[in-house]
Amino acid sequence: MTDKTKYAPKPPPEPVITGSLTPEPKKRGRKRTKKRYFTEDTDLAIKEYLSTSNQDERDTIFKDRIWYPFYKLAENLIHTFKFYYTEVDDLEDLKHEVICFLLEKLDYFKPERGSKAFSYFSIVGKNYLILYNNNNYKKKKQKTDVLAADEDEGVLHSLGRDQRKQEIKDFIDYFTEYIDKHMFTMFKKDKDRKVCDAINILFKRRENLEIFNKKALYIYIREMTEVDTPVITKVTKVLKKVYKKLYTEYAETGYVRV
């Protein structure tokens, strides 16, 4: 063997072809664009949190496995429903307030009843933000009315509210609070509770609504819940019966036992 043959570069190995030469068909369906934040592990973490009374264990579970899902839930609720009437300058502070509220409500969640954690905490968080948002909206509106009073006596207009309207307002406040408390016993299916919650939201935000047509309201609820009209009709009938029963109680006693 000559020196040239000894040190000559070896030819590269032939490529090994594996599998079929036919290109694989493209998978159909829409690609998931958003990563789920409220997962099966979140459900499991909540159950583990509730099953222990050791505060150190609870703190670890919450910090490592529950805080982030609650943070994203708060973020999505704020931006989806546009809860922008706030006392804080930074929405991060509002998210923190929602997380603290959800943490307070953790012990009220009963997974053994078959309720879904995401559904439960979505409703709880949404209700908190509705009250928070409405209260701040009223404060801003009152400031506007006071400023307008210097120019056109707008305060006299706000003070001249009809007593009947005030009574109806007070009753609806009782009614929405009652629905919040008893929703999970009134409706066993998630889609029914979604509709009930959407209708209750409309009651709470009634002062800000500009649509009163029944058909338009049905469309609005259907867009919020993504359920069919028959489901909305079924839930509405149940709520009508509860409304009449509670209003009779309110007319006789002046309040509703929530």
Image (cartoon, helix red, strand yellow):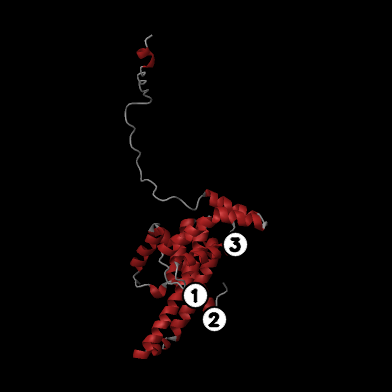
Out of 222 and 121, give the one closest to the viewer: 121
Q: How far is disc 3 from disc 2 in space, using C-alphas?
A: 29 Å
Residue 78, given in percent of the width and then of the height, sits at 44, 64
Given the image, on which type of amino acid does mark 3 rest? Tyr
Q: Is residue 114 visible from the viewing direction of this image? A: no
At 49% from the left and 62% from the top, the residue drawn is 123
Toward the viewer: 69 or 10? 10
The N terminus: image quadrant: top left
The residue pinned by badge 2 equals: 254
Q: Nearer the viewer, mark 1 or mark 2?
A: 1
Question: Mark 3 packing: few (<14 Cα in 10 Å), some, or many (20+)?
Answer: few
Q: Helix or strand or loop: what does disc 3 sit on? A: helix
What residue is shown with label 3? 108
Q: Characterize the local packing of mark 2: few (<14), some (14-19) or many (20 or more) Cα atoms within 10 angstroms.
A: few
In screen coordinates, is 28 left or right of 45?
Answer: left
Separation of marks 1 and 2 at Cα, in angstroms: 13 Å
Q: Secondary structure at mark 2?
A: loop
- Looking at the image, is mark 1 or mark 3 earlier in the sequence? 3
- Residue 31 can be seen, yes or no: yes
Q: Position of residue 233 (x, y in %)?
A: 41, 62
Picture disc at residue 12: none
The residue under the point 48% across, 61% down is 74
Q: Which of disc 2 and disc 1 is earlier in sequence?
A: 1
Residue 244 location (% of width, % of height): 48, 73
Q: Give amino acid for label 1.
A: Asp
Tell me the kind of residue under disc 2: Gly
Q: Position of residue 87 (x, y in %)?
A: 46, 73
**Residue that protrudes farthest toward the right in the picture:** 54
**What label sits on residue 173 in the rendered view?**
1
